[in-house]
Image: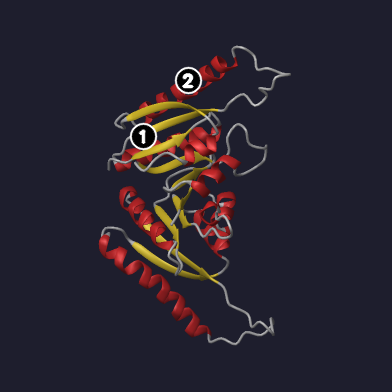
Amino acid sequence: MSSRIVVGTDGSVSAKAAVGWAADDAARKQAPLHIVSVVEPWPYDVSRYPAPADIGDTLSRGATRVLDEAAAEVRRRRPEVALTTEIVEGDPAAVLAHQGDDVAEVVVGSRGLGGFAGALVGSVSSHVASRARCPVVVVRPEFEPGHREIVVGVDDSPECEPALVYAFEQAMVCGAALRAVHAWQLPVHAYAPGIAYYDMDEIRLAQHQVVTERLAALSAKYPDVAVTGEPVCAHPVDALTKASRKAELVVVGSHGRGRLGALLLGSVSRALLHHSFCPVAVVRH
């Protein structure tokens, strides 16, 4: 593959985990890896309180050190990966979200140096996942790889298709099995919330058919990927979070709605960024 994988780093623990994940994925896909460190403008540059004269050099030196450390780790971990680095001035979220059409995916840590203590997912990773045109992988530092399974959320919406393709490709290059989880919930009668008027066998059959139809065409395209389909009567966040305990990666589409449309993350993908036990790939439609 010729498309680049881009990973952002600020030297934080989460960013270092993201660099390691990105290096491994670049090696699997035989793709070049581009490490970006973003230098934010001095936020207090007002006439009454001017910035220190050497603040730009100080920030640049810090970014250079962070890049050098990240590059050294990639060369130690995956010496075969073609590697480039770059320092960019600007807003980290905006820079990483707009990396160009030749980018296969953007990888970020779950929370950088500027995040609030105790926050599971920082504003930068959420912003990038909600705006980047390519898949975005969010990595937590506590994740320990070794599971041979990729999990993907499946439903009957158009947003699901790109996520499924990405999940099949990841399973293929990882040599992992693919587990498709279709979580569904019983609708409740609008005028009698306590009473359900449904044939459970019919519902189970319909949900199973959703999974089967979604997987059929891609299973033929990726015959080496072992696929299991799993309709689950549960909330999607609960089902996918549970599946993430034994997964290498959870892949979801994004169902952003509202006036901002494509600039919003759906509730499931947003919640998974906070609760998943493994990296999460958000693949936008």
Residue 54 in percent (x, y) is at 59, 12
Residue 11 in percent (x, y) is at 53, 28
Q: Residue at x 69, y 22 (%)?
A: 46
Tag 2 and tag 1, C-beta contact below 8 Å: no
Q: Measured along the vertical axis of the image, is residue 274 above or below residue 203? A: above
Image quarter (top left, top right, bottom left or bottom right) of the C terminus: bottom left
Residue 47 in percent (x, y) is at 70, 19
Q: Secondary structure at mark 2?
A: helix
Quadrant of the image occupied by residue 93: top right
Q: Is residue 154 found left or right of 195 in the rendered image?
A: left
Q: Residue at x 56, y 59 (%)?
A: 268
Q: Secondary structure at mark 1?
A: strand
Q: Is residue 197 found left or right of 46 in the rendered image?
A: left
Residue type at mark 2 is Thr
Q: Measured along the vertical axis of the image, is residue 242 above or below residue 13? A: below
Image quarter (top left, top right, bottom left or bottom right) of the N terminus: top left
> Which residue matches tag 2?
64
Dot 2 crowding, Cα within 10 Å, few <14, some 14–19, many 20+: some
Per the model, the C-alpha gap separating discs 2 and 1 is 17 Å
Which colour assignment does the render follow?
secondary structure
Q: Is residue 221 found left or right of 11 in the rendered image?
A: left
Of residue 254 and residue 45, the one placed in the foreground of this image is: 45
Q: Residue at x 56, y 40 (%)?
A: 124
Q: Is residue 283 found left or right of 11 in the rendered image?
A: left
Dot 1 crowding, Cα within 10 Å, few <14, some 14–19, many 20+: many
> Which residue matches tag 1?
33
Of residue 63 and residue 229, the one placed in the foreground of this image is: 63
Residue furthest to the top: 53
Q: Measured along the vertical axis of the image, is residue 203 above or below residue 221? A: below
Q: Could you say which disc has been placed on residue 49 in the image?
A: none
All told, the count of numbered labels is 2
Residue type at mark 1 is Leu
